[in-house]
Amino acid sequence: MKYLILGAGPAGLSFAAKLRQLGEDSFLIIEKEKEPGGLCRSVTVDGAPFDLGGGHFLDSCRPDINQFLFQFMPAEEWDTFDRISMISLNNKLIDHPIEANIWQMEIEEQVKYLKSAALAGCNLGVEMPEQFIDWIYWKLGKEIADNYMIPYNRKMFADELNELGTYWLNKLPAVNFEEILLSCLKKKAFGKQPGHAKFYYPKHYGYGELWLRMGKELENHIEYNKCAKEINFNQRNITTEDGSRYKADNIITTIPWKEWKEISGMPEHIFNNIRQLKHSSIETRYFPDRLSTDAHWIYYPEQELPYHRILVRHNFCRNSKGYWTETRVERTGMFEESHEGSPRFINTYAYPLNTINKNRIIDELLNWTIERRVYGLGRWGEHQHYNSDKVVELAVKLAEQLEERN
């Protein structure tokens, strides 16, 4: 075939759907699960949708991509929300982002955070440090670092934060003392608001419904229950665990590079570098309680709680109740025994970790594979922490580029 696509998550499905729109019919998707969607699959729990991968939704910031996806699930089937995210600090919820909403704290706390922001290294001309923890102090000040950013990131990503690089943190705004002071005096948020300010969620389904419908339209081009085991770069073919073999002019891989049992024809140093890539695994767990909050997301830096965030299902999913937690698997043992019967799901590959050498490893890997017409795509093919709308955008562009080139 012309294109072999590994994985029927948002990346693989969108790439294939765009190929078909461009008039290309020589492609096949192989998927290890029995249905499409990847991290964005949904199931029914307690009579309402539960998104297995945690907080996945359709962002509104890429209207062209939204219109592409609305071809499979029309816009009238979605609700639109102004995102409400909150942070739990000192047994009180304040709005996210923290630097714009310090004014919601007690006055004594406000004074501490203001002093800390004024002394942040980035505001004093101090040279930017290289290690993760030092960088957080330099960028955000001691109070935000100690009470929120460092404990939250430990819970979500890794106990040893200095294994992570700082290159991905540049999107964080510098803590601006003047804006924080203005917010405290005028009692309203100042400064740039975070991304994902608006989002779409299906009116009557989980987010996985979108990918089920896309998969339905591509069903003659998808083989399920096929787990890729070996990739051979010399022959450009794939072998699956059941012994099936597939050969293609172009291979699009959206699966984690560390999942390959065998890789043939790759230089040893690139293969060894793949083993250095790291990721986090999470558990999502359902609780039926109805919470007295308008928030959609709540972030919890408190170390005594196992989970790092919750998604309040009844505030964005119609006719539902309860909420679900997201917890790094290493911390799930902290749940009380009374919670052991709660519905829960493990995502072995949840978040790529931005370790210090990750970009160098991935750049060398993908530059080498592209020369052999094997293309990494999406969160796991590129080992980048992409949201689903970004993944779709990349998939559409890659399909257009390859079809134009071929």
Image (tube, rainbow, N blue to C red):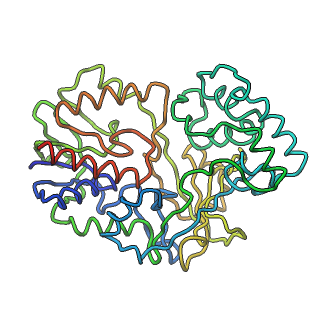
Left or right of 293 on screen, residue 115: right
Where is 204 relative to 254, above or below?
below
Left or right of 45 on screen, residue 389: left
| Residue 42 in which image quadrant | bottom left
Residue at 34% over, 54% down: 392
Residue 179 in the image, given as x and y percentages of width and height: 74, 44
User: In this view, which residue lies farthest toward the right?
Assistant: 108
Q: Quadrant of the C terminus?
A: top left
Residue 357 in the image, given as x and y percentages of width and height: 45, 25
Q: Give 143 or 265, whichever is nearer the viewer.
A: 143
Residue 108 in the image, given as x and y percentages of width and height: 91, 45
Where is 219 relative to 6, above or below?
below
Where is 230 relative to 71, above or below?
above
Left or right of 75 on screen, residue 326: right
Q: Give 53 or 24, whichever is nearer the viewer.
A: 24
Q: Give 400 or 385, whichever is nearer the viewer.
A: 400
Residue 367 in the image, given as x and y percentages of width and height: 27, 29
| Residue 37 in which image quadrant | bottom left
| Residue 91 in which image quadrant | bottom right
